[in-house]
Amino acid sequence: MTPGLGHNLGPSLEPGQSWRAHCWTRARQDLLPKLPIEVVRNRLRRAAEIGLDYRTYATVRASTGRDIVAFLFSTNALRLFRADQAMEQLRKDKLAGLRGCKRTGLAIAPLTPQAVLRGRSDVLDGVAAAPHVHATWSDAARAMDAARGAGLPADGVILVGDTAMERDWSQAGRLAGYLDAARFFTPPA
């Protein structure tokens, strides 16, 4: 019998299930890489440089096969709702601490890229216009491509946002992933 649509091809629940479950578990474990300790140390160091916990970094790295080379930060994630508004010190410190990656803001209208960058060039490498609230999927994809910039692989960029709309932008731009701002900016316990 062929499994139906949506079946993950895991062990069936027919007699002999425990043996098949054992074989299934073993096969899954054999697929996981056995990384040398120095590789793990380098990845731990890299995760710290870009302000991520190891688990998040390793998950993105495993799913894309690439290092994270840039972050896009929506003005919602940065808690910037007016051009003259000061950035919270916690967020400013986190951005300033990122090493070896590009930091780009996404100005959500009515904010403009120039207004968001003004006085923030010490923590942002640039600011691009975010997709319009009513942008089509293809318009959002083009805006994400423009924000990412030439030469940066989409699957090496993470969008840090605060809304479901921003999560959709990440998907439209085929980015490496989306991180909720609260998760990204909350100091580790």
Image (spheres, grey):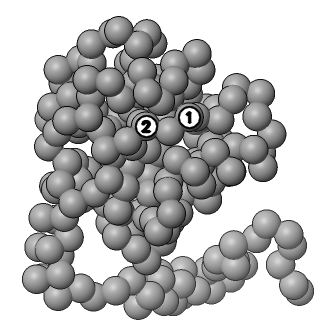
Classify mark 1: residues with Cα within 10 Å, few (<14), some (14-19) or many (20+): many
Quarter of the image where the C terminus is located: top left
Judged from the image, the secondary structure of the residue bearing numbered disc 1 is strand
- Say which quarter of the image contains residue 34: bottom left
Rate crowding at label 2 as few (under 14), some (14 to 19) or many (20 or more) other CA atoms within 10 Å: many
Q: Position of residue 80 (x, y in %)?
A: 39, 17
Report the amino acid beneath label 1.
Ala
Quote the CA–CA distance across marks 1 and 2: 7 Å
Query: Where's residue 10, x and y in %?
Result: 64, 77
* Mark 1 vs 2: CB contact within 8 A: no
- Residue 56 visible, this angle: no
Is 43 situated above or below 189?
below
Question: Is residue 60 in sight in this rendering?
Answer: yes
Q: Is residue 111 left or right of residue 53?
A: right
Q: Secondary structure at mark 2?
A: strand
Query: In the image, 10: left or right of 19?
Result: right
Seen at 58% across and 34% down, the residue is 130
Relative to 36, is 112 above or below?
Answer: above
Would you name the residue on which mark 1 appears?
Answer: 129
Question: Residue at 52% across / 19% down in the picture?
Answer: 111
**Which of the two residues, 64 or 91, is positioned nearer the viewer here?**
91
Residue assigned mark 2:
127
Question: In front: 14, or 112?
Answer: 112
Q: Amino acid at mark 2?
A: Val
